[in-house]
């Protein structure tokens, strides 16, 4: 079992390193190249989320005496994922501001306070979206636990009969 978890850890390390590299490049690019990189990073982040879900399932199967160690490692990976998602959202905000300026022209009439307010509102919306995504993942994990528990109870009842 631990070898599966360790394989997931290696894949997590590889994927997060790639994402970190790409997130750092987003603000330096423009046009179609930037758009493609944003889409690519979004897809890779989804892979990392799925990987974390697999790791979570593996931790549940670990013997009780080792579970705390694996849970602690998984928790740190989840924290790293949250940081990656925030960094990606920041790079997308910068990207959105750049696209907006290209489309509307750099309007000298717009005040600095309006731009700050727009950025704050955008960040707030992104935070709310992130909370909704986390809640959805938690609901899905709870559903999986319920399904697993139901299967386990059925097996137990079948053995008793």
Image (tube, rainbow, N blue to C red):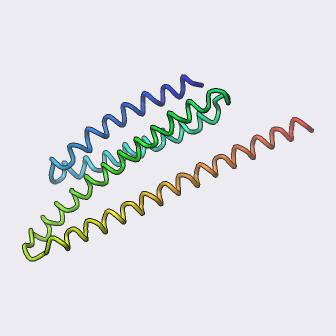
Query: In the current view of this chain or complex, which residue is farthest to the top?
Result: 3
Q: Residue at x 29, y 66 (%)?
A: 120
**56 to the left or right of 39:** right
Instruction: Residue at 18%, 52% (x, y): give it.
Output: 32
Query: Where is residue 94 drawn, in percent x and y?
Result: 21, 57
* Residue 121, placed above or below residue 28: below
Image quadrant holding the N terminus, namely top right
Q: State the residue lying farthest toward the bottom.
A: 109
Q: Quadrant of residue 124?
A: bottom left
Please report the residue visible at 21 percent of the width from the left and 47 percent of the height from the top.
26
Tally of marks: 0
For image coordinates 23% across by 61% down, the residue present is 96
- The picture places residue 98, in percent across and down from the top left corner, at 16, 60
* 87 with respect to 5 (left or right): left
Q: Quadrant of the C terminus?
A: top right
Query: Does 38 appear above or below 152?
Result: below
Q: Residue furthest left?
A: 108
- Vertical comparison of 8 with 121: above or below: above
Coordinates of residue 70 in the picture (x, y in percent): 55, 31
Q: Quadrant of residue 99?
A: bottom left
Residue 45 coordinates in the image, percent (x, y): 38, 45
């Amino acid at each position: 079992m631990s070898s599966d978890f360790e394989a997931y850890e290696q894949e997590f390390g590889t994927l997060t390193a790639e994402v970190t590299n790409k997130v750092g490049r987003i603000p330096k690019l423009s046009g179609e190249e930037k758009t493609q990189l944003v889409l690519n990073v979004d897809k890779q982040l989804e892979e990392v989320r799925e990987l974390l879900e697999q790791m979570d399932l593996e931790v549940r199967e670990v013997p009780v005496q080792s579970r705390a160690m694996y849970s602690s490692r998984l928790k740190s990976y989840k924290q790293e994922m949250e940081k990656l998602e925030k960094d990606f959202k920041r790079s997308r905000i910068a990207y959105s501001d750049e696209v907006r300026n290209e489309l509307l022209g750099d309007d000298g009439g717009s005040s600095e306070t309006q731009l700050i307010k727009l950025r704050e509102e955008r960040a707030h919306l992104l935070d709310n979206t992130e909370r909704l995504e986390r809640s959805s993942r938690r609901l899905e994990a709870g559903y999986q636990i319920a399904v697993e528990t139901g299967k386990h109870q059925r097996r137990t009842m079948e053995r008793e009969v």
